[in-house]
Image: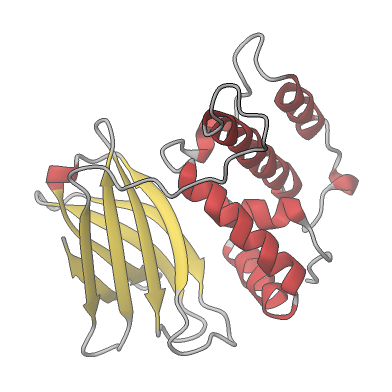
Amino acid sequence: MTAPEHDKALVGAYVLGVLSPEEITATETHLETCPVCRRELDELRLLHDELGEVPPEAFLDGPPEGGDLLLQRTLREVRGISSRQRVWGGSLAAAGLVAVVALSVGAGVFVGNQTAPGNTGGVAAPTASPLPSGTKHAANVDPVTGAHLAATVIPANGWVKLQVQASDIAPGQRCKLMVTSKEGRQEQFGGWLVGANATPGKAITLDGTALMSINDVASVSVVNDQGQVLVKAPV
């Protein structure tokens, strides 16, 4: 499986976490040798952080009636993509294109809101938004597996957004990101396949959401497909 050069749609899909484990591995391999795509990744991650309160699913049904014409047109094109036009198989091209449009349209709104009325001297640069009140942080290193996990749990209206960084997990592991409530209820909010050439100490960053109140969250963990807890961080 070979990544197409400088595929912005693919990088956008990677940022939003809509790739399969195999596609994630191939994308990360390509990013290691492609400075153009790494620069694109940094830019899209910045936009994703600014638009983080909007889950990716919000873009899949299209804009409201009378909404942005570019987004409407792109969504129509996505729905009409034939199998021979898709890259890397499945719905990757559609997901990636939606990801890029979602980030781009949102970025236009954000930058527009940063421009002062009557200011004709150019567009103001984006600034990082502070985390909401009630945000919780957790980190841990498993003494047996040596896996590292750092998590940020951000409250929303009846749900939470989770941002995690994980490293030092054995290559080939199929990992699931789990959040556990104080009552013991578990919910998966992401997953990935650790590449064969994973670099020790180099963290992977993943985002997700869970239908759980911030006050109900007890821990965040990484579990492999055999059910083994590789690392767990109490919140």
Q: How many marks?
A: 0
Relative depth, front residue between 137 and 215: 137
Q: Quadrant of the N terminus?
A: bottom right
Q: Residue furthest top?
A: 66
Relative depth, front residue between 17 and 110: 110
Report x, y in % for residue 194: 51, 77
Report x, y in % for residue 170: 44, 86
| Residue 180 is at least partly visible in this image | yes
Report x, y in % for residue 48: 52, 48
Residue 224 lies left or right of residue 64; in this view the side is left
Q: Measuring 57% from the left and 65% from the top, which residue is drawn there?
A: 21
Query: Splitting the image into 4 quarters, where does residue 134 fall?
Result: top left
Query: Splitting the image into 4 quarters, where does residue 214 fall?
Result: top left
Relative depth, front residue between 43 and 100: 43
Q: Measuring 60% from the left and 22% from the top, which residue is drawn there?
A: 118
Q: Residue furthest right?
A: 84
Colour convention of the picture: secondary structure
**Looking at the picture, does residue 150 appear above or below residue 103?**
below
| Residue 19 is at least partly visible in this image | no
**Looking at the picture, does residue 48 appear above or below residue 178?**
above
Q: Measuring 38% from the left and 52% from the top, which residue is drawn there?
A: 189
Q: Measuring 22% from the left and 76% from the top, which residue is drawn there?
A: 140
Report x, y in % for residue 29: 68, 77
Residue 78 lies left or right of residue 40; in this view the side is right
Query: Splitting the image into 4 quarters, where does residue 107 fall?
Result: top right
